[in-house]
Amino acid sequence: MAKINSIGILTSGGDAPGMNAAIRAVTRSAICNGLKVFGIYRGYKGLVTDEIIEFKSQNVSNIIQMGGTILKTARCQEFRTAEGRAQAYENMKKHGIDALVVIGGDGSLTGARILAQEFDIPCIGLPGTIDNDLYGTDTTIGYDTALNTILDAVDKIRDTATSHERLFFVEVMGRDAGFLALNGAIAAGAEAAIIPEFSTEVDQLEQFIEHGFRKSKSSSIVLVAESELTGGAMHYAERVKNEYPQYDVRVTILGHLQRGGRPTAHDRIIASRMGVASIQALLEGQRNVMIGIENDKIVYVPFAKAIKNDKPIDKELVNVLHELSI
């Protein structure tokens, strides 16, 4: 394998708190190990349009505490074409970039995998997504911060729900994964979580009404994962109005509020560990793997597994929520 002398780093897909901590770690670890670093702006779009500059240690000073990503992120239709990827590769050669570190979710890692296969480029992925839906890692960069944002919001909603004796449906992000909804519900003391993983198994609303909504409670909060499989919070609010008109129902959709904010200590630490691990992986000759954390240990997860395998929900957590909601 050819010796790696310089790396490129980009962030892609939805932003996640902790991405800047990861950028900082990758940059400084690479420099510490004698590598040149190039920051690629606006994700794969910047790779195609040549928005690439060399990074020094000072480029990543005072960013560990910042949300979002200093490298920006954007969608790129051109990169979906063979011609666009060929242009991206030409720009990498132009700057002498030998390997790529990509921070993002499954779509971003899919792009890295395709580029690696077509042009034989070593690529390392860091799991940067609030959804926590990548297989092979216990947690993803941004997940803990988003969870704490949800917790803060639900604590505030609880005050008004109790005051007005209402049933609140709170919609949280997660796409087709229920990690934010389920763990957010446990942490906030919510009465139930409606998640896509069980959408085809049971009528989660009926189950909640029959078992979770006690007459002794003057208010209730249900977290709903946004997903086509669940239909979202508005869908369930309409159902309650039609099927259980005795309840006073309200909906709060947290939306992009969950993506922003200063990363928690946990997200800063795992982003830093993963960033350093990405450079070590390249120096060891690893390629086309995602850096994950399992049982607090760094692991290498092949892109094929990280992208294609569904990350399972721990059903024990569902039991915990159910028992504590009485």
Image (cartoon, helix red, strand yellow):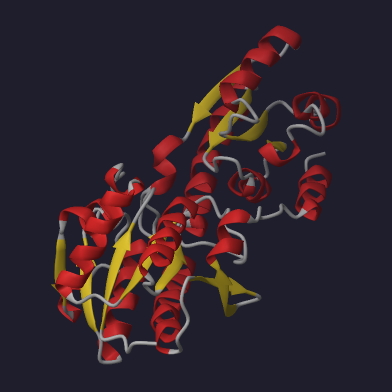
Residue at position x 66%, y 76% in the image: 295
Residue at position x 62%, y 43% in the image: 181
Please say if 222 is above or below 307.
above
Please say if 123 is above or below 281.
above
Instruction: Pick whichever, 275 or 77, lies toward us.
Output: 77
Please say if 5 is above or below 104.
below
Residue 264 position within the rendered picture, expressed as x and y whole percent measured from the top left: 44, 63
Q: Toward which corner of the image does residue 237 lie, by quadrant? A: top right
Residue 175 visible here: yes
Image quadrant occupied by the C terminus: top right
Residue 266 position within the rendered picture, expressed as x and y whole percent measured from the top left: 49, 68
Specify whether 54 is left or right of 155.
left
Residue at position x 19%, y 77% in the image: 96
Specify whether 196 is left or right of 263.
right
Image quadrant occupied by the N terminus: bottom left
- Tally the marks: 0
Residue 47 position within the rendered picture, expressed as x and y whole percent measured from the top left: 23, 58
Instruction: Pick whichever, 266 or 295, lies toward us.
Output: 295
